[in-house]
């Protein structure tokens, strides 16, 4: 059931840059890098690990990541898997229920920095292998610097909210902008969405 104010249940059409029957990709609010996207499932699925056996979900995720990457520069991909972010106590704390979703950043790798926040990590060379491993973890955190490099972190050690956004913000000189609710930058996000749709349209026309 759609939840009021859930940006993945009711995505802003002005922010959407790509979609198919399974996924929707949109410029995220609070864009802290030149290219920043949220890719989520249209169905209510707890994580992409839970979606790994759904037909065409993981191929669709790999496809849209490649499409959105510009000039063969791989976008950094992160996921907070099975993290309970939807509250019903009136705080409206990142209310987007359980749509599996990843964040894509135009950013250097944050894997080595993220390691200090977790007690365990494993690396894999394929998306399917990473999600096969994470299927037994609750929660899990994934960082991928390229389509051939995936690190799954578990046993979190006092992990702050929006950890991956915070680490990216630090690397790109946007400290203080990691909270997308406090710094939504809506006009910038919509401008980025227009630019991305135009770029993708030009690519399709070639």
Image (spheres, rainbow, N blue to C red):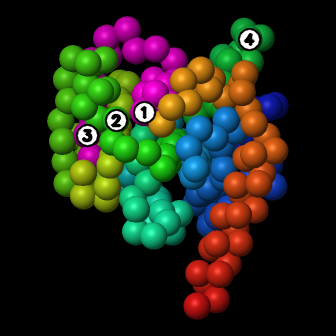
Residue 119 spot, x, y in % from top left = 21, 17
Q: Within the magenta stretch, is there residue 157?
A: yes
First reached walking from the N terminus: tag 3 or tag 2: 2
- Residue at image mark 4: 91
First reached walking from the N terminus: tag 3 or tag 1: 3
- Residue at image mark 1: 171
Asked whether disc 2 touches disc 1, contact meaning CB atoms under 8 Å apart, the reply is: yes
In three-dimensional space, the C-alpha distance between marks 4 and 1, rounded to whole angstroms, equals 30 Å
Q: Secondary structure at mark 2?
A: loop
In three-dimensional space, the C-alpha distance between marks 3 and 2, rounded to whole angstroms, equals 10 Å
Q: Residue at x 59, y 20 (%)?
A: 176
Q: Secondary structure at mark 3?
A: strand
> How many marks on residues?
4
Viewer-side label of 3, 2: 2
Q: Within the magenta stretch, is there residue 149?
A: no
Q: Quadrant of the C terminus?
A: bottom right
Q: Nearer the viewer, residue 195 or 59?
A: 195
In three-dimensional space, the C-alpha distance between marks 3 and 1, rounded to whole angstroms, equals 19 Å
Relative to 146, 93 lies left or right? right
- Residue at image mark 3: 151
Q: Secondary structure at mark 4?
A: loop
Asked whether disc 3 touches disc 1, contact meaning CB atoms under 8 Å apart, the reply is: no
Viewer-side label of 4, 1: 1
Q: Residue furthest bottom?
A: 206
In three-dimensional space, the C-alpha distance between marks 2 and 4, rounded to whole angstroms, equals 30 Å
First reached walking from the N terminus: tag 4 or tag 1: 4
- Residue at image mark 2: 110
Residue 125 spot, x, y in % from top left = 19, 54
């Amino acid at each position: 059931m759609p939840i009021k104010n859930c940006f993945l249940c009711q995505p802003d059409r002005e922010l959407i840059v790509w979609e198919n029957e399974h996924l929707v990709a949109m410029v995220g609010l609070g864009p802290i890098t030149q290219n920043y996207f949220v890719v989520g499932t249209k169905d209510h699925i707890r994580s992409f690990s839970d979606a790994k056996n759904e037909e065409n979900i993981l191929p669709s995720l790999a496809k849209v990541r490649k499409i959105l990457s510009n000039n063969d520069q791989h976008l950094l991909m992160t996921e907070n898997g099975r993290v309970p972010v939807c509250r019903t106590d009136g705080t409206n704390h990142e209310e987007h229920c359980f749509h599996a979703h990843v964040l894509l950043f135009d950013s250097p790798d944050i894997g080595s920095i993220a390691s200090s926040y977790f007690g365990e990590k494993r690396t894999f060379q394929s998306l399917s292998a990473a999600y096969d491993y994470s299927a037994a973890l609750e929660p899990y955190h994934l960082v991928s610097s390229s389509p051939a490099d995936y690190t799954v972190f578990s046993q979190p050690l006092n992990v702050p909210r929006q950890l991956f956004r915070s680490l990216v913000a630090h690397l790109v000189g946007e400290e203080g902008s990691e909270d997308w609710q406090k710094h939504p930058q809506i006009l910038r996000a919509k401008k980025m969405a227009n630019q991305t749709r135009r770029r993708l349209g030009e690519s399709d026309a070639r």
